[in-house]
Image (cartoon, rainbow, N blue to C red):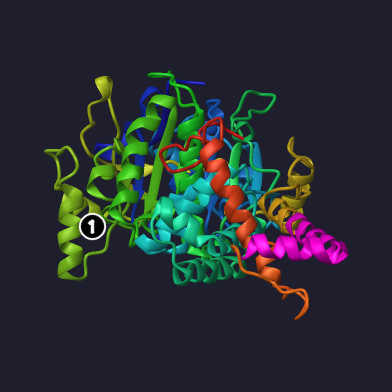
Amino acid sequence: MSDSIFVGGGGENYADPQALLLNYANRHGLIAGATGTGKTVTLQILAESFSANGVPVFLSDVKGDLSGLAKSGSPEGKLHAPFMERAAKIGFTDYSYAAFPVTFWDMYGEQGHPVRTTVAEMGPLLLSRLLELSEAQEGILNIAFRVADEQGLPLLDLKDLQSLLVWVGENRSTLSLRYGNVSTASIGAIQRRLLVLENQGATQFFGEPALSLDDLFLTDEQGRGRINILAADKLMGAPRLYATFLLWMLSELFESLPEVGDPDKPKLVFFFDEAHLLFDDAPKALVDKVEQVARLIRSKGVGVYFCTQNPADVPEGILGQLGNRVQHALRAFTAKDRRELKQAAETYRDNPRFSTEDAIREVGTGEAVTSFLIRKGAPGVVERTLIRPPSSQLGPITAAERSSLTATSPLAGKYDAAIDRDSAYEMLAKRAAEAAKAAEEAEAEEEEAPMAEREFKAGRRYSGSRVSRSTSKPTRKRSSRSDTVGQTFAKSFARQLGTRSGKALVRGIFGTLFSGR
């Protein structure tokens, strides 16, 4: 282990080592560049180096290439000679092939351990972002979450939320008096968005057993940090679900980890690939939350590295917090491209030996313009850098190799079987059944009561109206004798609002449950 990560050689003849200091690695970073310029390899060598230094890593495998981290490179590979030549050119004398400890995850449970969370943990803000709700619809979703907290209705999966929305619709009059207008149109719109989410496969994502964050911090017997790889090739078909899931993970880490100040090395490094998906059409409120988390989560020992094609994809307030940068080539074919390239160059500390703008345009595949934090957290001078070759296999492993690694993982069997315990759906169904049974019993008692008693009750019910025994039997109105299920719930809810003891669950910065699972 060392106190830095060797990224590549810079300066004249690439003889000047360019390194990322581990004690500043939690101050976040950026990996940017056009398609095919080497971003994936840079991500791979950073993941290798963090793991070798005992730092666990979480990253998403968008193209399926990063599974090669689990397998050693080979001298028989066609890239062996170029890799050895590059290692010698940049003075990488310790270069060797190696495999790294990997844990595979998959939201769909096909290429790794299933990843799940509950609706309650996702929270109303992130869920509204996921469903693309309007302000009014987001308000109703917040009402539903508040009711669930106050009524003690666990929201674990999508059917829990769907059944709760039905309940909110049935009791909208009572709820509107306390929380504001609750319209059936808005409830219907939310339900339709949930149906779309189901069709995208999110049913498997929401539920239990929920992911335990502790399982992201594992090391192997040699003390190397495990590299957690999320299979995202299929998930990219639902880009908003992908971005929201990663943002949820960040918020969970932020809310659950203790403050550690300035550690010698990060507790976890989180790579956010295809970062533009997080910010595309994102409301300002959400961007502000992300900026706040990025600013504060570093004190909890978590480094966040955004990977994207263009630095302009990342809002300026967040970009300014990314101290460690690897900028691969940018294309500048249009006036807009040239403006963005110039803006990217202006964010670096100038090097008198070359023009940063020209360098970003000219670097070839496997090269980059780099800048890392140096002593006292100051940005280092920008440098043209030849990136070191990876030690693990470049490219994916086979499906059989992936399955074997998953079966022998320390987490094998922990998340495989879904659990469906009693939650909002079952509780509301039980309440409805009990209310219906009570109504039937009340009606049966009415039928069995003597005629005089029924007439007496009927007289009290209709406020002094006189019923003649000699004319006809009292008219039976079911709605007069027993409340509907919705009315029963409404009355119960009103009573609980007035008499409920205890506190509602506290929600954190993104609306997830701060009190934990």
In the rendered image, which quarter contains the C terminus?
top right
Q: How many marks?
A: 1
At horizontal 52% and vertical 21% (from top left) the residue drawn is: 1
Q: Is residue 449 magenta?
A: yes
Give SS at disc 1. helix
Task: Please tell me whether residue 162 is drawn above or below residue 32 in the rendered image.
Answer: below
Could one spot residue 135 in this view of the protein? yes
Residue 434 appears left or right of 505: right
* Residue 151, percent from left and from top: 59, 44
Q: Main secondary structure of the magenta part?
A: helix
* Mark 1 crowdedness (10 Å alpha carbons): few <14, some 14-19, many ≥20: some
Quickly name the residue at label 1: 361
* Residue 200, percent from left and from top: 59, 67
Q: Image quadrant of residue 499?
A: top right
At horizontal 59% and vertical 35% (from top left) the residue drawn is: 213
Q: Which residues are magenta?
A: 433-462
At horizontal 28% and vertical 43% (from top left) the residue drawn is: 318
Q: Image quadrant of residue 140?
A: bottom left
Q: Is residue 34 magenta?
A: no
Return the residue nearer the eye: 168 or 98.
Answer: 168
Q: Image quadrant of residue 203?
A: bottom right
* Residue 176, percent from left and from top: 43, 57
- Say which amino acid is labelled 1: Arg
Return the residue nearer the eye: 356 or 241.
Answer: 241
* Residue 166, percent from left and from top: 59, 63
Task: Please tell me whether residue 421 is drawn above or below residue 500 in the rendered image.
Answer: below
